[in-house]
Structure formats: structure tokens, C-alpha cells
Amino acid sequence: MSITQLPWRRPCREWSLSRVAVVTGASRGIGAAIAKRLSEAGYELALVASSPWLEAPVYSSRVVTYQADVSDYEAVKAMVARIKADFGRIDVLINNAGITRDGLILQMAEADYDRVMDINLKGQFNLIRHISPIMLRQKSGRIINISSVAGLIGNAGQTNYATAKAGTIGLTKSVARELAPRGITCNAIAPGFIETDMTKDLEVPLQQMIPLGVSGQPEDIAATAVFLASEGARYITGEVIRVDGGMGM
């Protein structure tokens, strides 16, 4: 695990009132879009990625980057302790880190199944396990897990990915029930076909699969995440919100 302090500009409000968001898989795609929108909304950011940060993202609030494998329980524990020391609190967790290792079930290697489950599902558990005690002491917090429409309706060639994303839904609902009495919400977003590096090589018949007839953008997911992190979503927990152009109807 490595940590890098990046340049930042102090927000207008007092430091003690700052809200802090942790975003995994934050170096590109959906994670980067969520981080940008959260920064615009006034959050200070602890950004997590599996690879070294080669350049600093340009945001308007304080940013600290962390490199860690989210599937590594002890590495995540140490990273969360460092984030707590760096920021003093954690108000929002965005569990976005994810990978694909696609293949038909008859050809899928055990290692490809295990790795997707470790990153996409166990990684979310690891972050929640180590961040929830901080939120419990604060008696407040927002946990937002990125699932997928594949976790709701399945997808040929993605048994591992769809299984992990379906597991995210069960994780979300169970955590929501456990933490609700202390004012902590837990929700999931289920994206459909979103244009990112992960999906750029996929051929999707948009008109047939997506009623709106167009693919989504990372900003569509970011807008939903920022809403779920806001006070406007204080009475929403245990929900799975599809952002998919109608794909999962």
C-alpha cells in the first residue's frame, strides 16, 4: 500500500465541518466520475486504486490517494486506519472497484472466477468491515455499493461477474439492516451498459437491449451516487437503483 498527498485547495467551510468520502476504483471510469462530482459537492476525497497513481487528479477539494488491493483484508485494514488518521472521519464510502474476466461457464478458469469474486465482492466486504466502526462511532454515514444490472438479470459469459454483483445486492441489504439503527444508510447502484475502458470492446445492440437506445456515461452513475450520499437521501436504505436506460426492466 502506498499513499500520496496531492495538491488541494481548502474549501470555503471550516475544516472541522468537512465531509470525507472514500472512493475505490477511483483512478478512471465510473470511480473517477464519482470522485469529481463529490469534489464539486464539497467532499474531501480519499481515493483508492490498485495501481500506482501516475498523476494527480485535478479537483477543487483536498485529495489523498492510496494504492491497495481491496481484496486483501489486512491491507484494507491498514489503509482505512491511515485514512482515519489523515482525515479524522469518514462520511461516505463508495465501493466501486471492480474487474471482469469474462468467459463461458464451460471454459471459465477457476482463477478467473475467484479473482472477480475477490475484487468485486470480497473487496466491498473488506471496506465495509473496516469503515463501518468509524461510522458507527459517528452515528452517521453513507455506504454506496456499485452492483450491476447483470447482478439482477444475469449475463451470458459473465457468470463470475454477475454472481459477484448479485452478491453485492445481498451484502447491501444485510448491511443496511444492521447499520440502520445508528443512522447509517447502505444502498446499491446497478449500472447498465456504461461507456468505460471496461466496456469499450463490447459490441452491444443498443436498440434491442436498451429501451432508451443509447449507452450510459460514467456521469450518470456519479449523479446517482452523489444523490445517495446527500441529505436528500437520508430516508433511503437497502435499495438497488438501476441506472441502465431501461435495460433491466
Image (cartoon, helix red, strand yellow):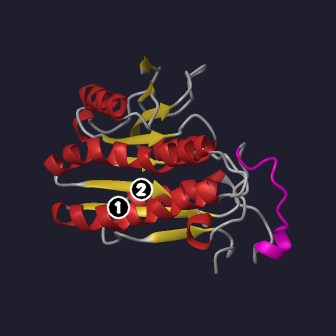
Q: Quadrant of the rendered structure where residue 152 is? A: bottom right
The answer to whether residue 47 is above or below residue 234 is above
The answer to whether residue 206 is above or below residue 34 is below
Please give the label number shown on residue 163: none
Please give the label number shown on residue 144: 2
Q: Please identify the quadrant where the N terminus is shown.
A: top left
Amino acid type, label 2: Ile
- Which residue sits at x=67%, y=58%? 158
- Which residue sits at x=16%, y=54%? 139
Q: Residue furthest bottom?
A: 249
Residue 159 in percent (x, y) is at 63, 59
Q: Are marks 1 and 2 in contact (CB under 8 Å)?
A: yes
Visible residue check, residue 40: no
Residue 112 in percent (x, y) is at 62, 43
Residue 28 in percent (x, y) is at 62, 38
Local crowd size for mark 2, using a 10 Å CA cut-off: few (<14), some (14–19), many (≥20): many
142 left or right of 153 in image: left
Range covered by the magenta-colored residues: 198-209
28 left or right of 124 in image: right
Q: Earlier in the sequence, mark 1 or mark 2?
A: 2
243 left or right of 9 in image: right
Q: Which residue is mark 1?
A: 186
Q: Nearer the viewer, residue 228 or 3?
A: 3
Amino acid type, label 1: Cys
* Magenta region includes residue 219: no
The answer to whether residue 235 is above or below residue 27 is below
Residue 241 in percent (x, y) is at 51, 70
Mark 1 vs mark 2, CA separation in Å: 6 Å
Q: Nearer the viewer, residue 153 or 87?
A: 153
